[in-house]
Structure formats: structure tokens, C-alpha cells
Image (cartoon, helix red, strand yellow):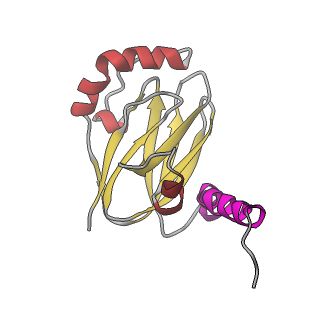
Amino acid sequence: MMKLTASLFLPGVAALMLAPAFAGSAMAGDADATVINLTQTARQCVESENGVDHGYTSTEKADCEEINAKTGDARLANSDVLTLKPGKYIFRVTNKNVPYSLGFWVREEDYNWANPLHKLNKTSVSGGGLETGTTLDYEVELKEGEYLYSCPLNTTPDYKLVVKG
């Protein structure tokens, strides 16, 4: 009988925890996925805020944090809740004019990045490298439930996404 030791167990756990992070890349371009287009400008996703570009500017993340501390809650209260059916989706995200690298993160509403169990059994897809003027795809399969999506690097509000059949 094989004895399970930390040296054998921990690398396996690490591989399982990292697997979801790489899964999106392997599946990118799935023909069965529905594309959701999102445009990031400073401090916001335009489509999520009823298609209104507030015209904010930013030269660094701290600018976004400052304006969202003042206006984020009100904007979020008036934002569109994205409602989808269960299935595969590609979030096609464009950095329209933010002069630094952005990213995108969609996750279950109660997802806690610091909880290692959530990395194994909760939905979370994220990535960076979204330079000014570029568009990247983030693929995810969504089941019924409530989700949030945002850009932590642009400190957008946590927009709400509801998936129901």
C-alpha cells in the first residue's frame, strides 16, 4: 500500500487548483459558446451601465478607486443585471482607451479567492494582459446561479450576472 506523504499529496493538490486557470485557454474559440461583448473604459464596463460611457479618465488604478468610492454604489444600483441561460459563454472584452493593462474576472457571487476549496468547486475565470485598444476572450461555462464580473485592475464595480434556465 502506498503511503500518502506531503511531498506526493501537495503537488497533486496544486495541479488541481491550477487546472481551472488553464482550462479557459484550452477551450478558447468554442463554436458552441455565445459571445458577450464588453467594452472597458476608465472605471467601468460601458454595456453594464446601460450603454453609457461616463467619460471618466484614468492614468492609474488609484484614479479608478477614487471615483468609484464616490460614484460606484449609485452606478451599480442603476446598472443592468446581465441575465443569461445556463451554457458556454465567451466574454469578449475590449480595453477601449485605458492607458494601462486591464483584465477581466467572472466568478460565482460567493467566490472567495482566498479559500482553496473554492478554487476546486466554484466557477472563477480571470485573466489580464488587456492592453489599450486590444480585445481578449474569456470562456466560461455558467450554471444556474448568481455571479459577479469586474476588472480588478480597472477597479470597475462588481456587476451582477444571473443565470437561470
Name which residue lies at 31% across and 15% down: 70
Say if the magenta span includes residue 22: yes
Position of residue 4 measured from the top left corner of the image (x, y, whole percent): 72, 72
Q: How many marks?
A: 0
Query: Which quarter shows the N terminus?
Result: bottom right
Q: Main secondary structure of the magenta part?
A: helix
Give the residue drawn at x 50%, y 49%: 115
Q: Quadrant of residue 14?
A: bottom right
Above or below residue 54? Residue 47 is below
Please check the rendered image and state whether residue 26 is part of the magenta-colored stretch, yes or no.
yes
Q: Residue furthest bottom?
A: 1
Relative to residue 64, is residue 146 drawn left or right? left
Residue 95 position in % (x across, y down): 54, 33
The percent coordinates of residue 151 (x first, y second) are 48, 35
Q: Which residues are magenta?
A: 6-27
- Residue 78 in sight from this viewpoint: no
Q: Between residue 111 and residue 126, name the one nearer to us.
A: 111
Residue 18 in sight here: yes
- Residue 143 location, quadrant: bottom left
Q: Is residue 108 above or below residue 27?
A: above
Q: Is residue 142 left or right of residue 21?
A: left
- In the figure, 15 relative to 133: above or below? below
Q: Residue at x 36, y 26 (%)?
A: 53
Q: Which residue is at 51% across, 41% downward? A: 104
Task: Using the rendered view, name the quadrant where residue 144 is placed.
Answer: bottom left
Quarter of the image with the C terminus is: bottom left
Residue 98 horizontal/vertical position (percent)? 54, 24
